[in-house]
Image (cartoon, rainbow, N blue to C red):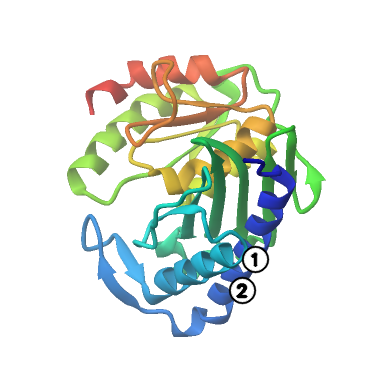
Amino acid sequence: MNHPVEDLLEIATRAAAAAAQFLVDGWATRSVVSTKSSGTDVVTQMDRGSEALLVEAILASRPDDAILGEEGGSREGTSGVRWVIDPLDGTVNYLYGFPVWAVSVAAEVDGEPVVGVVHAPALGTVWRGATGHLAEANGTGIHASGCDDLAMALVGTGFGYEAAVRAAQGEVVAGLLPRVRDIRRAGAAAVDMCWVAQGVLDAYFERGTHLWDRAAAMVICREAGAQVGGLTGGPASDAMTVAAAPGVYPSLQKALIEAGVGHE
């Protein structure tokens, strides 16, 4: 079955924009409705409302597609296309008014991510990527940085919400910090990865992301010339995601192993 990438990209762009506007409009009435992995890992009513809106928008155009959503809005499909959606990446940031949060929408065809849109309204930025070497921010082409020295690399990361996981991640950061220019933690994996694609960060790593956190940004990174994978040559996974400029990708992987990532 033919699934034009341009059509999927347009659907993803429209759906992400509608959900982003919903989140902007509802910010004043946001509230916590539940928690996930810990008492600080929250879900707001806006996460759920955004996901419902995304599902509705996608199915209105493509009713036979599958959907994987963070907040339970998942369904099977028959078309060979699956949408992977994060209705609000950076929920805690959103809750506090810290501007690093986004809606993330990806489309897979036969299991391969081909389209990604990350819409971050509080940052005024929409990143888009599609198979065929489209990677852009607000309509302007982007490319990963040319950094080739880990010691000069600005590196992003994120932390889990469980205390034991945070303790292990803190030890890794302590081991890595003397080996890089500096480390940033903004709190939204999709945005961090898009910053790698844009050259705002030279690299990013995180344990504990989920497919909906990274799927759209993986497409954008790939098409912008960044490398994305796991720790030891495999694909990015919940266990570890590394995204980096090609010049520092291997050295970051090596440094992470030496800092103890494999022992978490």
- Regarding mark 2 in the picture, which secondary structure is present there? helix
- Residue type (three-letter) at the residue carrying disc 2: Gln
Q: Quadrant of the N terminus?
A: top right
**Label 2 with label 1: CB-CB less than 8 Å:** yes
65 over 115 or under it: above or below? below
Residue 21's label in the rendered image is 2
188 over 176 or under it: above or below? below
Residue 63: percent from left, percent from top: 54, 61
Q: Quadrant of residue 122?
A: bottom right
Residue 50: percent from left, percent from top: 49, 70
Residue extending furthest left?
A: 164
Residue 85: percent from left, percent from top: 48, 55
Q: In this image, 157 relative to 169: left or right?
A: right
Q: How many marks?
A: 2
Residue 14: percent from left, percent from top: 67, 63
Residue extending furthest bottom?
A: 29
- Viewer-proximal residue, 42 or 180? 42
Residue 17's label in the rendered image is 1
Q: Quadrant of the C terminus?
A: top left
245 over 23 or under it: above or below? above
Q: Residue at x 52, y 36 (%)?
A: 110
Q: In this image, 128 relative to 95: left or right?
A: right
Q: Residue at x 48, y 43 (%)?
A: 214
200 over 187 or under it: above or below? above
Within 10 angstroms of label 2, few (less than 14), some, or many (20 or more) residues? some
Q: Is residue 185 in view from this perspective?
A: no
Q: In this image, 114 relative to 31: left or right?
A: right
- Residue type (three-letter) at the residue carrying disc 1: Ala
- Viewer-proximal residue, 113 or 234? 113
Q: Residue at x 57, y 81 (%)?
A: 25
- Viewer-proximal residue, 195 or 84? 84
